């Protein structure tokens, strides 16, 4: 944290401008060494200056330099941003000169990491920055803005405040039992407060899981025996010929993926190899991958053939997916019916992909199954990453343990232990406590220069 870092903050390639960012105690001095224009050490903070980047007497590029002095900067360190002409050669040359004059190449996400370590942002806000960069839908963008603005962080801080008030009252009672003017905390008085906190956390978890869907979308796996229309369905949903379609069984031997936007939510759809017994080594590997997709998908769409009788493989697949969210569809209703629907769920969707029949019904079923029509972003001040949601669920478990302890008439100091654990877990969400390994993992996902 004592050194000065530099990196290119814009995408590499030809463009109108490139931005090279420098942050650290020596950033102004380092840039000053290669800048021909005003003396940057004497300019006011948050000002922009015209000049040239030079190497000895050679002009490298015509630039605008922004000078921002600590503490009112993103990293709370001195920051200088060099706006040069876009292009690989001038941008890399400017970065090279900065490194030769005392700066160090920044690690991925190191600017944001410094912003966190210097107290400028918390972990939720840092995650929001990454999310807005990678957002692929307008709803995801709005969700990210809520994180960056601090609204989501305040939600967790309010929960921690409610819990710490309970902890404080308990500890006053334990440490100063002789005082007559303090409220005596009993299990009976604690219970309604803990139930209220439990309700708040439960609501936050539910909304956070909705937020995760908005941020990441849904993983949808299309499965079935060979030649039932899996690839045709993928192509229809994507409105492009993504997967090869033939009448030959086993054409799809590898995973084919595509993404559509349904009600503002991304569906990450995977077309799998037909699942059947096979001696072909390549096809067998495809079948194994298909079975893995079943385990990792949020939704399974299983396709049956309307013009074929139910097979042993069909029955096995229906049994495999019964514990997961799934939709069963019968394709090729334009052909003669040989499928016994009395042996199948009543909510099966009948479609004809070649005639584009039933596709809208399939989309409506997905919307209903995941409440996509109800997901809004105006009030989604909730968590959206797996780590934070997991910590929230652990804190809920600790509150529930406290409630159970009260119901079992356990001593109040035993009740307090789980309440403290819940408070600490909520602190991990916003980064009140953390490990170096956690920070390295989180910020390594950022791009260079951010």
Image (cartoon, rainbow, N blue to C red):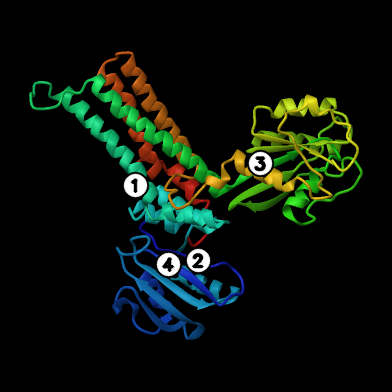
Q: Secondary structure at mark 1?
A: helix
Residue 333 point in image, percent of width and height: 84, 40
The CA span between labels 4 and 1 is 31 Å
Eyeballing the image, is 196 above or below 106?
Answer: above
User: Which residue is denoted by mark 4 in the rendering?
Assistant: 22
User: Which residue is denoted by mark 3 in the rendering?
Assistant: 365
Residue 304 point in image, percent of width and height: 81, 35
Q: Nearer the viewer, residue 130 or 348?
A: 348
Q: Would residue 55 be visible to someone looking at this image?
A: no
User: Which residue is denoted by mark 2 in the rendering?
Assistant: 9
> Residue 368 lies in what quarter of the image?
top right
Residue 154's disc is 1
Q: Earlier in the sequence, mark 3 or mark 4?
A: 4
How packed mark 1 is, by other alpha carbons closer than 10 Å (few <14, some 14-19, many 20 or more), is some
Q: Earlier in the sequence, mark 1 or mark 3?
A: 1
Q: Earlier in the sequence, mark 2 or mark 4?
A: 2
How packed mark 2 is, by other alpha carbons closer than 10 Å (few <14, some 14-19, many 20 or more), is some
> Residue 432 lies in what quarter of the image?
top left
Q: Earlier in the sequence, mark 4 or mark 1?
A: 4
Q: Nearer the viewer, residue 146 or 371?
A: 371
Q: Secondary structure at mark 4?
A: strand
């Amino acid at each position: 944290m004592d050194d000065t870092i530099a990196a290119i903050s814009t995408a590499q390639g030809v463009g109108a401008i490139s931005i090279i960012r420098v942050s650290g105690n020596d950033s102004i001095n380092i840039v000053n060494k290669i800048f021909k224009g005003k003396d940057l050490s004497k300019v006011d903070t948050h000002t922009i200056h015209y000049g040239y980047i030079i190497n000895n007497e050679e002009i490298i590029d015509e630039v605008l330099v922004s000078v921002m002095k600590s503490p009112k900067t993103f990293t709370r360190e001195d920051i200088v941003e060099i706006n040069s002409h876009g292009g690989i050669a001038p941008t890399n040359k400017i970065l090279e000169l900065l490194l030769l004059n005392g700066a160090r190449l920044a690690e991925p996400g190191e600017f944001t990491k410094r912003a966190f370590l210097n107290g400028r942002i918390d972990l939720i806000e840092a995650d929001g920055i990454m999310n807005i960069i990678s957002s692929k839908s307008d709803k995801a963008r709005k969700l990210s803005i809520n994180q960056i603005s601090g609204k989501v962080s305040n939600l967790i801080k309010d929960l921690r405040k409610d819990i710490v008030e309970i902890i404080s009252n308990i500890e006053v009672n334990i440490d100063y039992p002789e005082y007559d003017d303090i409220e005596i905390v009993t299990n009976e008085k604690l219970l309604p407060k803990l139930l209220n906190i439990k309700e708040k956390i439960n609501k936050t978890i539910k909304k956070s899981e909705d937020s995760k869907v908005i941020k990441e979308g849904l993983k949808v796996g299309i499965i079935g025996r060979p030649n039932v229309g899996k690839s045709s369905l993928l192509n229809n949903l994507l409105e492009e010929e993504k997967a090869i379609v033939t009448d030959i069984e086993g054409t799809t031997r590898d995973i084919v993926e595509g993404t559509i936007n349904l009600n503002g939510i991304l569906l990450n759809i995977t077309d799998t190899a037909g699942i059947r017994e096979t001696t072909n080594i390549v096809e067998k590997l495809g079948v194994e991958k298909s079975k893995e997709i079943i385990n990792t998908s949020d939704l399974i769409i299983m396709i049956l053939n309307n013009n074929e009788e139910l097979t042993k493989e069909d029955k096995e697949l229906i049994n495999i997916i019964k514990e997961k969210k799934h939709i069963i569809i019968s394709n090729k209703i334009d052909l003669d019916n040989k499928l016994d629907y009395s042996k199948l769920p009543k909510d099966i969707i009948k479609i004809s992909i070649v005639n584009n029949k039933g596709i809208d019904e399939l989309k409506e079923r997905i919307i209903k199954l995941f409440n996509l029509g109800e997901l809004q972003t105006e009030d989604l001040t909730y968590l959206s990453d797996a780590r934070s949601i997991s910590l929230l669920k652990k804190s809920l478990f600790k509150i529930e343990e406290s409630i159970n302890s009260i119901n079992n008439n356990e001593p109040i100091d035993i009740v307090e232990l789980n309440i403290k654990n819940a408070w600490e877990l909520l602190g991990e969400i916003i980064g009140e406590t953390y490990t170096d390994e956690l920070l390295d993992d989180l910020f390594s996902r950022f791009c260079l220069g951010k």
